[in-house]
Image: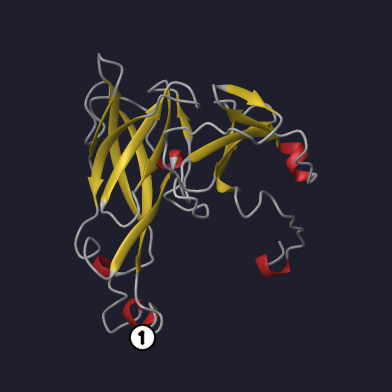
Amino acid sequence: IDAPRQWQYTTYDVGSADLTWFSSVFFADSRGEGDMVYIFGHGKGADGSLPSQNSDTVLARASLQHLLEHDWAKTEYWTTPGVWSAQPEGLKALGLPSWETTCNWSEALGRWYSFNIPAFTTDIFLHTAEDITGEWIKTKVFSVPYPFAQSPWISYAAKAHPELARSDRRRDSPGLADGDCELVFSFISNAWVDSSVETSGNILFAPGGMEFHQRGYWPRFVRVAARMSAETSSRARCIA
């Protein structure tokens, strides 16, 4: 197998300065069958600023094969008042925050789900929806612990890992009550510094900085027990 630095690949521009499509891409079919993928993107902010983690998430769908062939022409966009369109105009916000994220289908919950840490905060939320287009409901599931909950640390990139979750819903599964399903996510904490004064490496690699309890820019994994309540909203709690 070739080393990653020897891989041959091609790139091409997608989107524009006013519209980006990099936040997440995932199969539209919950079983991973078929060729259709959903794509999360971002337009300008409400104040006209460039796309950022504070911009509304917008949605597109396309054939994966077409994307691999660098053919963006057949992509469709979710637009106001709630229809798919061949033109990226009048894009309808999903009501789901995203930035360096994942979105997955849970058979156990019967919902799409995604994790998110609002920019420059320490609370992590689980977002769920019956349909990819919403309505999305959020539930707080975790708070970033010490020392990463304080300056100079920021936490971001909350991502689900369904491949790590236990698939059973038995009473004897540690931390899971009968009827619960397990979701697993990770997040990253990095040093946020004034680059004109110092570099983040001064903190990341300071004496003792590689000890696990305070090791920055290192994925932290969290297990969550989740179920749907009688009101059809999501309920979740951290179990590890």
Q: Which residue is located at x 48 percent, y 51 percent?
A: 100
The N terminus lies in which quarter of the figure? bottom right
Q: Position of residue 216 (x, y in %)?
A: 33, 68
Is 25 displayed left or right of 221 in the figure? right
Q: Which residue is located at x 48 percent, y 37 percent?
A: 103
117 vs 220, nearest the viewer: 117
Q: Position of residue 116 (x, y in %)?
A: 37, 45
Identity of the residue furthest to the front in this view: 47
Few, some or many residues within 10 Å of mark 1 (<14, 14–19, 20+): few
**Image quarter of residue 68:** top right
According to the image, label 1 marks what residue? 197
Q: Secondary structure at mark 1?
A: loop
Q: Which residue is located at x 61 percent, y 34 percent?
A: 60
90 vs 103, nearest the viewer: 90
Q: Position of residue 239 (x, y in %)?
A: 22, 40
* Amino acid type, mark 1: Val
Numbered disc total: 1
Identity of the residue furthest to the left in this view: 146
Q: How is the image coloured?
A: secondary structure
Q: Position of residue 13 (x, y in %)?
A: 72, 54
